[in-house]
Amino acid sequence: MKKSIIALAALGTLALGGWKYWQQQQWVTTDNAYVKADVTLVSPEVSGRVTHLFVRDNQWVKAGDPLFQIDDQDYQANVNISQAAIAVAQSALANNASRMQLQQVSIEQAKTAIEGASANAQFQQSERQRFQKLLKSASVSQTAFDHQNTQAINAKANLKNARLALDAAHQQLNTLAAEREQLNAQLKQAQSKLALNTIALQRTLVKAPVDGFIANRQVQEGKFVQPGMGTITLIPETVWLNANFKETQLNHLIAGQAVDVRLDMYPDTVIAGLIDSITPATGAQFSMIPPQNATGNFVKVVQRVPVKITLTLPDSLKGRVYPGLSAVVSIALQP
C-alpha cells in the first residue's frame, strides 16, 4: 500500500511537471506588470495664497474646470496700473497729434511769410537800384538813398529770417514726429504689460488641464503656492499596462499580439489587451546608475524589457483600474 502511494505521488509530480512544461511551451507569462497612466501634476503658474478650493479628494473633473483660486488683489492692481499707463500714453499721443497739426499750420504761415518777405525784398532792392540812379543824377539826396538802402538790407534780412523760421518749423515737426514714435513705443510697451498682467490675473484661477480624478491633493485654503509646486495630481481614466518580460522571452513577442491580463485586484476577471510596442532598451538602462560590467567580476542577471500593453476594459471596470496596480500577463504562443 505504501509503495502504491509513493508511486502515485511520483506520478502526480511528474504529471504536474509535465503540465507546467507544456504550459511554458504554450504561453509566455510574467507577473512583473503594472498599470500605468499619463498622470498630470498640476502646478500654478503664479504665486500667492490660496483663497478658495473648488474640488474635493478623488473627484472627477473635466479639462477647464476650476481647481483653486489664488489671491488676485496684487494681480488686479497690476492690471489697473497697466490700464492707467495705456491711458497716459494715449493722452500723450493725442496731445502730440494736436501739436503736430498746429506745427503744420505754423509751417504754412512760415511759407506765406517767406512769400511776403521775398516780394518785399525784391521790391526794396528794385527801389534801391532806382534811388542809386537818381542819386547819380542828383535827383535824390544822399539821405534818401541811404534810407532806401537800409530798407533793402532790412528786407533781405527779413527774408532770411523767414526762411530760418520755416527751417525751424520743419525741425520742430520732425521732433514731434520722433516724439510720436517714442510715444507709440511706450503705448505698445504699456499694452504688452497689460497683456502680461492680464494673463497673470487669469492664471490666479487654476483650472484642470485635462480630464481626470483628483489625487494626491497637497493644497488647501490659506496655503502659499508658487510656480513649479505640485498641488494636485490628475489621474486619467485611460490606462495601459507596462509588463517587464525577460529578455529570453522577447523573441516570442510582436506588436499587435493578443494578451490576457489578470489584475491582482480583480483576479477572477480576464482583461483583453494588445501589445502596443516594445521598449528598445532594457529597464536597467533607465536607472539612475546604469550597470557597468566592463571591468571586474560580475554576476549575469537576466534583463527585463518593458512592453506596453493597451487594455480593453469591460464596462464594470471602467474608472476602477488605477495606476500602480499589479497584474499577471499571459500571451499565447499558438492560436
Image (spheres, rainbow, N blue to C red):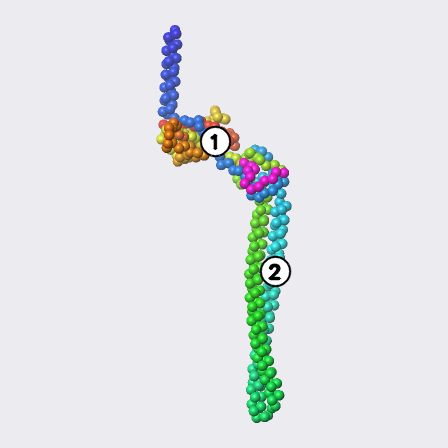
Q: Quadrant of residue 245?
A: top left
Q: Considering depth in this image, is 123 or 24 the residue closer to the camera?
A: 123
**Residue type, mark 1 in image:** Val
Residue 120, numbered circle:
none
Disc 2 versus disc 1: distance between alpha carbons? Answer: 63 Å
The residue beneath circle 2 is 92
Left or right of 121? Residue 281 is left
Name the residue at the top extreme: 1
Name the residue located 37 percent from the left edge and 13 percent from the top edge.
Answer: 10
Name the residue located 56 percent from the left edge and 60 percent from the top edge.
Answer: 182
Report x, y in % for residue 12: 38, 15
145 falls in the magenta region: no
Does label 2 or label 1 sit earlier along the sequence? 1
Q: Which stretch appears magenta?
A: 222-233
Q: Considering depth in this image, is 296 or 74 the residue closer to the camera?
A: 296
Left or right of 205? Residue 7 is left
Q: Quadrant of residue 335?
A: top left
Q: Main secondary structure of the magenta part?
A: loop
224 falls in the magenta region: yes
The residue beneath circle 1 is 35
| Mark 2 secondary-structure assignment | helix
**Residue type, mark 2 in image:** Ala
